[in-house]
Amino acid sequence: MASADTTSYAPLTEDTEADVTVIGGGIAGLCTAWELSRTGRRVVVLEADRIAAGVTGYTTAKLSSLHTLVYDRLRRTRGSGAALQYAVSQQGAVERVAEVAQELGIDCELERFPAFTYVRDPAGTDQLRAEADAAREAGLPASYVTETGLPFDVAGAVRVEDQLLFHPRKYLLALAEDLRGRGGGVYERTRATGLHEGSPCRVTTETGATVTSREVVVATHYPVFDRALLFTRLSPRRELVVAAPIETGRDIGGMYITEEEGKRSVRTAPYGADRRLLVVTGETFTPGTGDTIERFKKLADWTVRNFPGTEIAYRWAAQDNDSTDTVPLIGPFHPGARHTYVATGFGGWGLSGGVLAGSLLTGLITGDPPPWAGLYDPRRLWGPVREAPAFLSHQAKVGMHFIGDRLRTTHVDSVADIPPGTGAVVRVGGQRAAVYRDEEGTVQAVSARCTHLGCLVAFNAAETAWECPCHGSRFGTEGTVLQGPALHPLEQLDLGRDV
């Protein structure tokens, strides 16, 4: 976000028509819109805020087909054929970015590096050997190694060659401009609020304008329309990121991830003439739970301890959604859908997932789907028994927050107990209020009920936001929607004498 141009596309203020409406201006939405525009279709993109500035704008930008430990899991649960299809589609997305960047002459800092999944505990090496074997069987240039470019020893690692690091925002802004050159429309600050499925489809917006089109793609990271009930198959998680400049000579020569220590993901990026930016991700948690400030400290301490001499220059957070069977949901929106499609559940690998979503959805809409489309079909019922444990676990957590959070009489006793610069949920006048007191002491109060399905929000002190632990909606202190699936802001409250 700090090293790419800003955007200022106008909002949609008048009714318009298109061949395809794409809701969401992240990597999935923009790649889908661009691929469709190349088929001669007029495509309109609706983005609630700014394009490539949400989850995509804050990604750690690892474009890889090595997704921790997915291949052995797929081989065991869905067979070698599914693992092969996953590898072909994911590695195809890696190569697609390289092809398009060259075709359009996009300067997006493309770099080829190997990707690693590693463990430091010898007890995990058997699992990595199985993953290396499954990835290699699926056609990837994978191997099991014990040496890496990390400044500490590892017990073992899976290594896959020829993966990509790049600047996704620079890449996507170029796609958006090329899309407009092909007659497409890009509209920012245009939140979609309604979807009428039919022939044609109609998308209504917060601005009052309506887009009429034959096809609609919902690519909002977490679907903002609930008719497919996909929220029962998606678990939101938030991950923290810290970054520190290092000398070029200290570069680690690849991208790394481990599920140990609360997950750690490490990569570098160009940073001036003679330095790299070390980017470290980890401390995974459900939005609206736990102490985010303490988690940031833990991640920063890990970085400094393992990369001595570094000084943290940046910190931010990103959000992902995991599907209950670990494979993204890309395809028809629901069993009865004829002209509506969805892309979601990327499980932390939204860059390759978003790019392949563009190819997959374009194939479905044009009648020429790729051979691996069925792997990602949201309507799949390949193994409800296998999916059931994850499904039930997710629903149990949602139920715990929906019911358990209401059993607490209050989160603090009164508004007066809230220190400056913090927020808390308080029972006021028989209802729960989400109350934030700024550094000057001014109080802002909104309803604590998430406008998605009514769970109670909690305060994230590190990011100064209200978060829903059930489905991941996020709101500003004044109640505005920062992240869906919620479509509407939290209700404003007047505390009167209770302040």
Image (cartoon, rainbow, N blue to C red):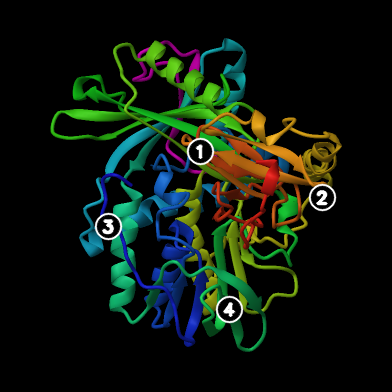
Count of marks placed on residues: 4
Work out whether 354 lies above or below 131.
below
Helix, strand or loop at mark 3: helix
Q: Looking at the image, do the residues carrying marks 1 and 4 touch, with CB atoms under 8 Å apart? A: no
The residue where tag 4 is placed is 203
Front one among 374 and 143: 374
Q: Which residues are magenta?
A: 136-156
For the residues bearing labels 4 and 3, Cβ distance under 8 angstroms: no
- Spatial CA distance of label 2 from label 1 is 48 Å
Give residue 440's position: percent from left, percent from top: 47, 36
Residue matched to label 3: 101
Give the amino acid type for the residue marked by disc 4 in the picture. Answer: Val
Image depth: mark 4 or mark 3 in front: 4
Residue 178 falls in image quadrant: bottom left
User: Disc 2, disc 4: CB below 8 Å?
Assistant: no
The Cα–Cα distance between marks 3 and 1, rounded to whole angstroms, is 44 Å
Q: Residues within 10 Å of mark 2 (few under 14, many from 20)?
A: few
First in sequence: mark 3 vs mark 1: 3
Quick check: can you spot residue 98? no
Residue depth check, mark 1 versus mark 4: number of the one nearer the observer: 1
The residue singled out by tag 1 in the image is: 438
Image location (x, y in percent) of residue 279: 37, 30
Q: Nearer the viewer, residue 221 or 381?
A: 221
Q: Which residue is mark 2?
A: 384
The label number, if any, that marks residue 60 in the structure image:
none
Distance between mark 2 and mark 3 Cα atoms: 40 Å
